[in-house]
Image (cartoon, grey):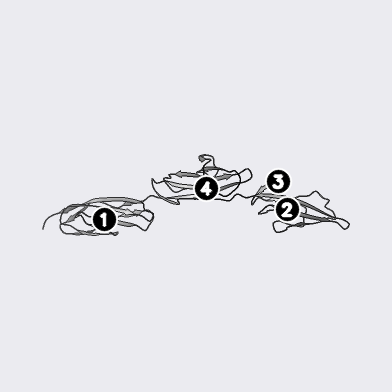
Amino acid sequence: LGWISLSTVLRLARVLPSVGVSYQWSPAETLSNPTISNPIATPYQSTTYTLIASTSACVDTLTQYVDVHTLDATLTGDSIICLDDTATLTVTTNTADTYHIQWSEQADFQQLIADETPTVRVAPTATRTYYARVTTDQCTRVYAFTVTVSRLIVAGSRDYLLCFNDPITLSVVCDGIPPYQYVWQLGDGSTYNGATPQVTTQHSTTYGVTVTDAIGCTATAGGFVTVQEGT
C-alpha cells in the first residue's frame, strides 16, 4: 500500500475465502476490529500490519504496509490589536516535505489574501478569523486564528454650564478592552489620573482626557466648561 496522511482512516482488505476462515490482524491497537478480513486502520505512524488467516487445515500469513506522512504546523500571531494597527500571522512547520501555504478570510478559501508565504500582515477593522491551509503532496491541514480588534471609543464628553465656584465631576464612557487608564488635562494646567475628577473653577475653561485600554489603544475626548460669573 502507498501513503496516507496522519489521522486518515484506511480500510485494510485481503481477498480471502470467508467461510471457515478466522482472521487475526496485528498490531491491533489502531484497528477497528482485528478479527475481520477488512478492518479500518487509523495508524499514527508508518506501520506494517500482519494478518494471520487460518482454517482448520491451513495457516497463512500476509502483511500490509501503511506509510503515514505527518504534517505538524502551528499558526501564531497578534491576537489583539488596536483599530488601524496591523497583525502579523505566521505558520511554522517542521515537516521535511515540500509544502504550500494559502491564506484566506474564508474557511472555504474561495478568495485568497496571500499565497506561498508563511507570514502575512493583516489590518482588520473588526474582529476577524483568518485561515491558513498548509498542503504537501500527501497531506492538507487548515488552521484558524482570530484577531480581536479593540475599537476604543470614548464617549460622554460634553460642554458644561456652571455657576461661579460650583464643583463638577467630569466623566466619560469607554468602549474598549478594560481596565482603562485616564489622564485628564484640566484648564488650570494640572492633570488628574483617574476616572472621575472633580473640578471647581471660577473661570470658563477647557478640559481633555486621554484614555488607554488594556492593550495600549488610546483615544481622546474633551469639552468646555462655561462659568456664569456673579454673586
Instruction: Pinpoint residue 139: horizontal percent, then vertical percent.
Output: 62, 46
What residue type is disc 3 on? Gly
Chain-order first, disc 4 or disc 1: 4
How many angstroms separate mark 3 from mark 2 (CA)? 12 Å
Q: Which mark is residue 184?
A: 1
Nearer to us in this view, 167 or 32: 32
Residue behind mark 2: 48
Residue behind mark 3: 2
Badge 1: few (under 14), some or many (20 or more) residues near its Cα, within 10 Å?
A: many
Q: Marks 4 and 1: which is nearer the front?
A: 4
Q: Are marks 3 and 2 in contact (CB under 8 Å)?
A: no
Instruction: Pinpoint residue 124: horizontal percent, then vertical percent.
Output: 43, 45
Nearer to us in this view, 24 or 202: 24
Chain-order first, disc 4 or disc 3: 3
Instruction: Pinpoint residue 76: horizontal percent, then vertical percent.
Output: 49, 51
Residue behind mark 4: 91
How many angstroms separate mark 2 from mark 1 (CA)? 72 Å
In the image: residue 227, left or right of residue 89: left
Badge 4: few (under 14), some or many (20 or more) residues near its Cα, within 10 Å?
A: some
What residue type is disc 1 on? Trp
